Amino acid sequence: MSAPSGIRIISDVQSLEEINGTPSPTILVKKIHTFDRHARAFIERSPFVILSTASDSGNDASPRGDAPGFVKCLEDSTLLIPERPGNQIADSLRNIIERPATGLLFLIPGMNETLRVNGDAYVTDHAPYLDALTARGKTPKLAIVMKVTEIYLHCAKAFVRSSLWDPSKHMERSELPTLGRMILEQINGEPPSRELEDNVDQALSDDIRDNLY
């Protein structure tokens, strides 16, 4: 990646560490490689995870959410993640097929600490796995299996700085346009008619109602 003229790029680890410093042994030791009771408890209580994947054509970070415990610990170092209905672009799945290295960030509402999990993943339609991920009577068509190589609890600084869970800091939804309007403007480069905006917003709402699982 190039930068504008006059912008220094930090392109080697030594330069990075000279500016950023290096982690202490007490920080590094917190990285574990199999699920202990604390990591399992965190995953069981988490209703939301960000899935990070990459391929030769680009990177992707995708939100995944469901009832707490929707991600399953199969073994001491294996996770099972449902692939619920979406827009069928399937960037994450395509990336995993091309390059299995995957990262997860588990969140629990109201908790400032997070759980980070890294490893290699694959996509499967193995029936017993899919059955284990059934929700509201609906069984997913696909699942992601992740063989974990690194697990660690992440401190609260980012959430403290952002006040993410503080209701007094939450934005009024009316401060941004509807999703339908934003999408139409991105596609057409100009504000849509109110009728078209309403139609797209209704279609998005119907999709959530009819295709959540």
Image: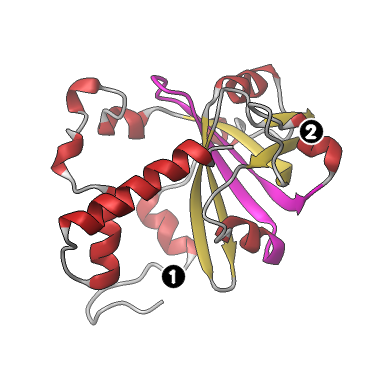
Which numbered tag is attached to residue 47?
none
Q: Amino acid at mark 1?
A: Ser
Q: Residue at x 20, y 55 (%)?
A: 195
> Closer to the camera, 69 or 151?
69
Residue 69 location (% of width, % of height): 62, 24
Q: Is residue 119 magenta?
A: yes
Q: Which residue is mark 1?
A: 11
Mark 2, Cα crowd under 10 Å, few <14 / some 14-19 / many 20+, is some
> Closer to the camera, 58 or 114?
58
Q: The N terminus is located in which quarter?
A: bottom left
Q: The C terminus is located in which quarter?
A: top right
Counting every numbered tag in the picture gives: 2
Query: What secondary structure is found at the residue carrying circle 2?
Result: helix
Q: Is residue 109 magenta?
A: yes
Q: Which residue is mark 2?
A: 131
Q: Quadrant of residue 88?
A: bottom right
The part of the chain drawn in magenta is: 97-125
Q: Earlier in the sequence, mark 1 or mark 2?
A: 1
Q: Residue at x 64, y 35 (%)?
A: 151
Q: Residue at x 42, y 42 (%)?
A: 206
Query: What secondary structure is found at the residue carrying circle 1?
Result: loop
Residue 108 location (% of width, % of height): 47, 24
Q: Amino acid at mark 2?
A: Asp
Q: Secondary structure of the magenta portion, mostly?
A: strand
Q: Residue at x 16, y 61 (%)?
A: 193
